[in-house]
Image: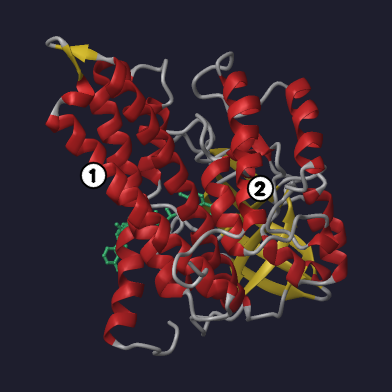
Amino acid sequence: MSDQERYRLPEELRMTRTVVRDFIRDQIVPLEQDLEQDAIHLPEEDFDRLAPMAKEMGLWCMGVPPEYGGAGLSIFAQAVLHEEMVQHRAGLYLPAYGTMGSAPPEIIFEGSDYLAETYGMPTVEGDRKAFFAITEPSGGSDPARAIQTRAVRDGDDWIINGSKIFISSAPWADWGIVFARTDPDSRRGITAFVVEKEWPGFSWEPIPVLRAYYPAQLFFDNLRVPSRNVLGEVDNGWDLLANKLLARGRIPYSAANLGVAVAAHNLAVEYSKTRETFGAPLATRQAVQWMLVESEVEIRACRWLIWEAAWQYDAGEDFRQAASIAKVHSADILGKVVDRSIQIHGGYGVTKWLPLERWYREARIRRIGEGPTEVQKMVIAREILNPGGPPR
Ligand SMILES: Cc1cc2nc3c(=O)[nH]c(=O)nc-3n(C[C@H](O)[C@H](O)[C@H](O)COP(=O)(O)OP(=O)(O)OC[C@H]3O[C@@H](n4cnc5c(N)ncnc54)[C@H](O)[C@@H]3O)c2cc1C
């Protein structure tokens, strides 16, 4: 049978997938037994032991181009490996606890050499940490309209005033990319700036949410930013934002949803075979089997949707509709699969002894973060009704 008749993952990717699977199962999952349920960091000595192993395996910062110290994998390969990387308790938001690298927002490498060398590369090396800030108190679904943070030129610098909300990783980061309005008369007059948390005029507060890895609200009060920290062209941040950052990011984001769904499903399958009620294992009951079947069908369909989006991206096609479809479906099935797995585990499902409880909470964010389901559906509907139409 030829490759065209039956699709198989390329052999090298299958081998790498096994390496990642083994790394998570043998190195990360056992460590989690001794951590508290909501832990967001590994003990330092474990991190320092594991990170070099991941580097050795050639898996450090998978999506970052090799010239900047990453593995430079295709989006498709990243999607396949991401599904494995997240299969542990903290995996949805902290895959492998960063032991396989914490990449900066990859658009940093589309700016000047100065920005790549000052911010991008030290972040790939693990010496710095980054956030990216789009959402504002005025709204996140429609950033082109909602961004009110203003940047005004002052000599060779820019002065930023405004606020960003729900910014992930900002509490632990030391720099980030902030999108601010530079042309108040244009919906698209947005520019990306690289800012440092230590600079005068920058402050932040934690926002308590249902995951321990809490986001922050950022405040800019006459924050002075040198011109060399403009990322890309002035007034052209929308292109970076909409086309390069947001849409592409939905593919690994969806793969993470899928991976956690797979992990939750596997727990349910195993438990149903050993837990007995009324004299027989749960797995013998049709009601339980059908729950397992629904999860299995949803997981398999989801994987192909993600792969389709990834293939389109790698082929240079317009992948935005496929990425939105993958995002909507994966966020939806993640919630459903975790919910069914909890149901099959009965009372144990909601204890903090199992990862299901944490996944159940964290999964809820996935239908809101990275563009809510309803907004993704707008993108999908636009393409159904007007195929190949202009981007928004
Ligand atoms: C834990 C967490 C971490 C986050 N991390 C980041 C980050 O790192 N950086 C960042 O920039 N942002 C981040 N966000 C923000 C996230 O992207 C926004 O919350 C999201 O885009 C929605 O924006 P909003 O909350 O302002 O909701 P709104 O835009 O006010 O929308 C509210 C709700 O209305 C519905 N809705 C919106 N538009 C439509 C429509 N046209 N038709 C029908 N229904 C609609 C949706 O259900 C939506 O959830 C994070 C959010 C959370 C919760």
Residue 188, relative to residue 10: is it above or below? Answer: below
How far apart marks 2 and 1 lie (CA) works out to 29 Å
Question: Which amino acid, by three-letter code, is at mark 1?
Answer: Glu
Question: How did the renderer colour the structure?
Answer: secondary structure
What is the total number of numbered labels drawn onto the structure image?
Answer: 2
Q: Which residue is mark 1?
A: 294
Q: Is mark 1 within 8 Å of ligand 1?
A: no
Indicate which label's residue lies in the foreground, 2 or 1. Answer: 2
| Crowdedness near tag 2: few (<14), some (14–19) or many (≥20) residues, C-alpha within 10 Å | some
Q: Quadrant of residue 220?
A: bottom right
- Residue 333 in the figure: left or right of residue 195: left
Q: Residue at x 49, y 58 (%)?
A: 136
As drawn, the label of residue 139 is none
Q: Quadrant of residue 98?
A: top right
Residue 146, relative to residue 188: is it above or below? Answer: above
Q: Which residue is mark 2?
A: 16
Q: Mark yes or no: residue 146 visible.
A: no
Question: Which amino acid, by three-letter code, is at mark 2?
Answer: Thr
Closest to the observer: 173 or 319? 319
User: First in sequence: mark 2 or mark 1?
Assistant: 2
- Residue 88 in the figure: left or right of residue 139: right
